[in-house]
Image (spheres, rainbow, N blue to C red):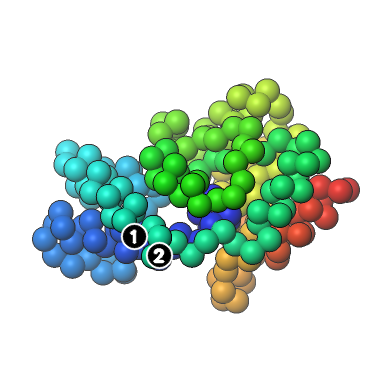
């Protein structure tokens, strides 16, 4: 979802930094935040705050909701049209995300598409990506096989999760800078992924083949 369908980078950064400033009573730098490698909201707070993680998560949700209107940078161009087109082709569509359900429900209100056949959030799995648990859970819910599926994602952990589940992976490039694209392409192709999407329309070309 994040980085693939919607641009929530600024929203997450400001929500996290405001939360940690309040809880830890000090400024946390972006570099420090990145060093914690936030794979999901609850897991980040469990890692940093230990037994007080629930307090941090609740405060994060407060900031995430308050900041959403001002810092949410929207659905990426052509994504909604792509999803509508795939839906009209009777292609099953699902989300497997590291986002918590409560944060997902906040952001989903801003997405003009809701025809999902399955949604698997971080709350639904015991292990986050790069574990393939979430993807396998989605397949089970849809009663389909890995060879019938393509997973579209913007991160290396997406690629690991997809390929370890024997699911074809398509890497998203529309959210990345030039330097980020080069490193991402190098990494995912070294894993064996061959499909790269510059725009959502590229996914539609695949669906017609």
- Pointer 2 and pointer 1: residues touching (CB < 8 Å)? yes
Q: Residues within 10 Å of mark 1 (few under 14, many from 20)?
A: some
Nearer the observer, 173 or 15: 15
Q: Residues within 10 Å of mark 2 (few under 14, many from 20)?
A: some
Residue lying at 39% horizontally and 58% vertically, measured from the top left = 68
The residue to which callout 2 is attached is 71
> Disc 2 on helix, strand or loop?
helix
Q: Is residue 68 above or below residue 135?
A: below
Horizontal and vertical percent position of residue 89: 81, 41
Instruction: Say left or right for 29 vs 183.
Output: left
- Do we see residue 39 in this rendering? yes
Q: Is residue 182 above or below residue 206?
A: below
> Disc 1 on helix, strand or loop?
helix
Horizontal and vertical percent position of residue 101: 42, 38
Residue lying at 75% horizontally and 54% vertically, measured from the top left = 203
Nearer the observer, 87 or 46: 87
Q: Is residue 2 above or below residue 30?
A: above
Q: Quadrant of residue 147?
A: top right
- Do we see residue 156 in this rendering? no
Instruction: Say left or right for 38 vs 152.
Output: left
The residue to which callout 1 is attached is 67
The CA span between labels 2 and 1 is 6 Å
**Count of marks overlaid on the render:** 2
Horizontal and vertical percent position of residue 47: 26, 46
Q: Is residue 86 above or below residue 133?
A: below
Horizontal and vertical percent position of residue 201: 76, 59
Residue lying at 69% horizontally and 48% vertically, measured from the top left = 83
Residue lying at 55% horizontally and 35% vertically, measured from the top left = 119
Tag of residue 15: none
Q: Quadrant of residue 30?
A: bottom left
Residue projecting furthest to the left: 25
């Amino acid at each position: 979802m994040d980085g693939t369908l919607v641009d929530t980078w600024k929203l997450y950064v400001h929500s996290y930094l405001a939360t940690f400033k309040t809880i830890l009573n000090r400024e946390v730098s972006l570099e420090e935040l990145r060093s914690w490698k936030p794979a999901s909201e609850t897991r980040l707070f469990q890692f940093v705050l230990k037994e007080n993680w629930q307090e941090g998560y609740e405060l994060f949700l407060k900031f995430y909701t308050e900041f959403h209107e001002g810092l949410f940078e929207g659905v990426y161009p052509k994504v909604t049209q792509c999803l509508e087109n795939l839906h009209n082709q009777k292609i099953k569509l699902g989300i497997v995300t590291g986002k918590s359900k409560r944060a997902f429900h906040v952001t989903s209100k801003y997405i003009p598409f809701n025809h999902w056949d399955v949604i698997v959030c971080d709350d639904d799995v015991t292990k986050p990506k790069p574990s393939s648990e979430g993807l396998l859970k989605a397949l089970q819910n849809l009663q389909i096989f890995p060879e019938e599926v393509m997973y579209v994602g913007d991160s290396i952990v997406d690629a690991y999760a997809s390929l370890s589940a024997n699911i074809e992976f398509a890497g998203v490039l529309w959210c990345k800078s030039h330097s980020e694209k080069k490193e991402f392409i190098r990494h995912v192709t070294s894993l064996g992924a061959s499909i790269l999407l510059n725009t959502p329309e590229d996914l539609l070309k695949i669906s017609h083949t």
